[in-house]
Image (cartoon, helix red, strand yellow):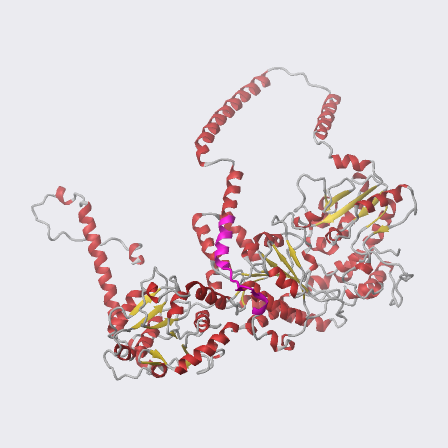
Amino acid sequence: MGCLEAGIPPVKRDPLLRSPSVSSTARSRPRSKFARFRLDYLQWVCSVAVFLFFVVLFTMFLPGLKDMNVNPRDLVFLREKIGGLDFGEDVIRFEPSKLVHRFQREAVELKRFSAFNVTLRRFHYRKPQLALVFADLLLDQQQILMVTVGTALRELGYEIQVYSLKGGPAYDVWNNLGVPVTIIQSVDTKNIGIDWLNFDGIVVNSLQAKGVLSCFLQEPFKSLPLLWTINDAALAVRLREYNSSGQQELLNSWKKIFNRATAVVFPNYALPMVFSTFDSGNFFVVPGSPAEALEVDSVVALNEGKPREENGLGSKDFVITIVGSRFFYKGLWLEHALVLKAIQPLLLDCNNDPTSRLRVLIFCGTSSSNYSVAVEAIAQNLKYPGGTVEHKSVDDNVDRFLSEADLVVYGSFLEEKSFPEILVKAMCFGKPIIAPKLSMISKYVDDRVNGFLFPKDNVKALRQIIKQLVSKGKLSSLAQDVALHAKVTARDFMVSDAVEGYAWLLQTVLRLPSEVARPKSIGDLPSEFKKKWMWDMFVTGAGPIYQNSTSGSFSFLDTVEVEWNQTHRESSGMTAGEEPFVYSIWEDQKSTELAAARKKREDDELKDRTDQSHGTWEDVYRSAKRADRAKSDLRERDERELERTGQPLCIYEPFLGEGTWPFLHVTSLYRGIGLSTKGRRPGGDDIDGPSRLLILNDPYYRDVLGDYGAYFGISNRIDRIHKNAWIGFQSWRATARKASLSTVAETALLNSIQSKKYGDALYFWVRMDKDQRNPMQQEFWSFCDSVNAGNCKFAFSEALKRMYGFKHDLTNLPPMPSDGGTWSVMQSWALPTKSFLEFTMFSRMFVDALDAQMYNEHHRTGHCYLSFSKLVKCRTSIAILGCSSCS
């Protein structure tokens, strides 16, 4: 076997059969190729013989061999005979323990902090916002799942918006539910103009939405809660190929997405095992999907009217299909042997009719496994006629054979964490099922109602059930009635598991701001939202339509690979045929450079030997200044910079990360200022914020200060970068909400400034009464409290006390006018430059007092009294309202 091929030295054979007269030269002569082949062939034959011997040795201890009177219930006898083998032993299981423990730990920390700081309050001004992202809007199992789950989530109090890269029939389904749908026009991450910060959570429902997933790898969207659902193993197959072929860049791009997701959600416990190498502790399983029922509908429609003979089955054969767990474990052969022993009496029953015969199909393992040898040995030992028992791999068309079966037996005694999908398909086909009484199966199958159950340690009960269901090669009326009832109920299996699973996961993952109302608890959800999938929404005039998502996944991955290979070739700048030509050019260039270096060294040596006239210090100074001016002239001034010089106003747009690029302006009136050295626009004249304010290099203060970091950075030696009489700021989020200055408004603002219509005034264009967080039109302090966990007034008063050195408590805060005007939000305003400097002087003192007040507690626990969440940005909410003015 494999261990014999490596690590054990070859056996030295003594040449006893050789003639003693043979010379040493002849003995040392290498053996012929034929001789070596003959020895290797004999070794192979011996290995196969040893393997078959052990197979027969194991099968000798099966029930019914040495002692036909042994009770099949006596599993202790079997364990003693075969060395203590237990059912379902040696199986690796997936447990989302890391993710669950993290959720539990965060919940405990939040409760501890909430109990310590009792002043936190939650306001119910808006509902939690969710974005559902799809690759397309075709009618498939994921659309049915998400429509069902989304309807339940809306009942719990969520607001949902759908985004898709392509349209499809499901567009009308979501519209009929009152859910807005947006078709994303571009899959380029630099051109997707969506402000994802408007949402409290994102659910991406396909790996084909990779372009959108890449958005969440960039700031400012890196910290948003993100759920990514994976429904098939297509990506796992390709990832293994990438790893073996050395395509590390393509492999790493997918790894980044796996690591970025807050939770990677799978519909069963087998898929996480396939993707186990990419599990960073964020894998989670939400069982339940309409995929099995849809696949059954597709198989029935495709094979309608086709005879059994196409699958090698007789038209009157009685076919029993034995299915089992997705996992292949060492006790499985024993379980199959016990099931075959229980089926054995049907041989006499079916042999009474010469036109029909018994056929037993066992589905297990892959086509590359040698499990067929074990099945054949077991069947021969149990005296099954040749061809009666046949092993089929799961690679075969399992669904087609299930549709042709008369009876389905679940032959695995392994305790599963979710209901077996293969049994759901069998029930949807209308086949009577027999299964062991396992906890997860008993949860959904009622004995003699929609299936038949037997104790896993009482195989005799299985034999009795089979006798009741099969008579003279035909199913009994009881079996037919139970199968019909199961066909109806199986289409809506595990709806409650899916709905409650997603609801629990979202409530656990989301960290809702203080102005957002909590959703209802899962226990308050009416039962009608958990009973059945919403099939009626997807029935067209021609009946339900099913799209195979797995084939679509493979097609998408093919496209990704082609694009990656093309980009890789372009970046390398050559093709395989050009490599020899480029190498020859490189050799010529190398020899030329060596010759030039040799000549330069000789010239330098000759130059050192000659007398040189030394200039004065004035000549050296003039030469240095001349070189410095020449260096500065090399950088041509940008056209926008030249136009900006003669303008009265320059509006700065603070931004962080590539995710903000689609919302930044490129005209001369605007100029960007990056809060981080990373994520700056290439080829632009953006200001590097950290180089002007070193504290922005600290991620903690960069996140805490927010736009105020840009204010302080520009005000530091402002004359070096800003030479305009007026200065303005506009948030990129204002552009995302379509609340930024229009072309007409820009012209009106410039005319008003040049004409000095209002003198030294502050102009703003994003109003608090239009803010989506303030639907009840609250006044300043009430709105400020709502976005700061009820502690806005307290924070202001404590900061003012520290600024001015007050020893007593402040009972009255600065009066805020309420004369029918409105307040500015989102930091979008303009004012004279000298007034801006006065504003920043006061703001720096205020921010310093606020930081001194909260720094220690925030660093020690990660919490502050302005937020319910453990976030580093918990003070940004006050910064959003820091600059306010009444109109």
Of all residues, the one furthest to the top in this rendering is: 611
- Residue 430 quadrant: bottom left
Image vertical order of residue 390 relative to residue 768, above or below: below
Does residue 545 show up magenta in the picture?
A: yes
User: Residue at left 89%, top 41%?
Assistant: 754
State which quarter of the image contains the C terminus: bottom right
- Residue 624 quadrant: top right
Image vertical order of residue 757 relative to residue 701, above or below: above
Residue 693 visible within the image: yes
Q: Position of residue 657 (x, y in %)?
A: 67, 49
Image vertical order of residue 720 relative to residue 357, above or below: above
Q: Report whether 652 appears left or right of 263.
A: right
Q: Report whether 747 appears left or right of 354.
A: right
Q: Report whether 760 appears left or right of 859.
A: right
Q: Position of residue 735 (x, y in %)?
A: 74, 51
Residue 437 visible within the image: no
State which quarter of the image contains the N terminus: bottom left
- Residue 685 versus residue 533: which sits nearer the camera? 533
- Residue 62 versus residue 136: which sits nearer the camera? 136
Q: Position of residue 440 (x, y in %)?
A: 48, 76
User: Residue at left 51%, top 38%?
Assistant: 572
* Magenta stretch: helix, strand or loop mostly: helix
- Residue 864 versus residue 389: which sits nearer the camera? 389
Image vertical order of residue 721 relative to residue 581, above or below: below
Instruction: Please report the bounds of the magenta region as a residue range.
Output: 535-560
Q: Position of residue 488 (x, y in %)?
A: 49, 75
Does residue 742 show up magenta in the picture?
A: no
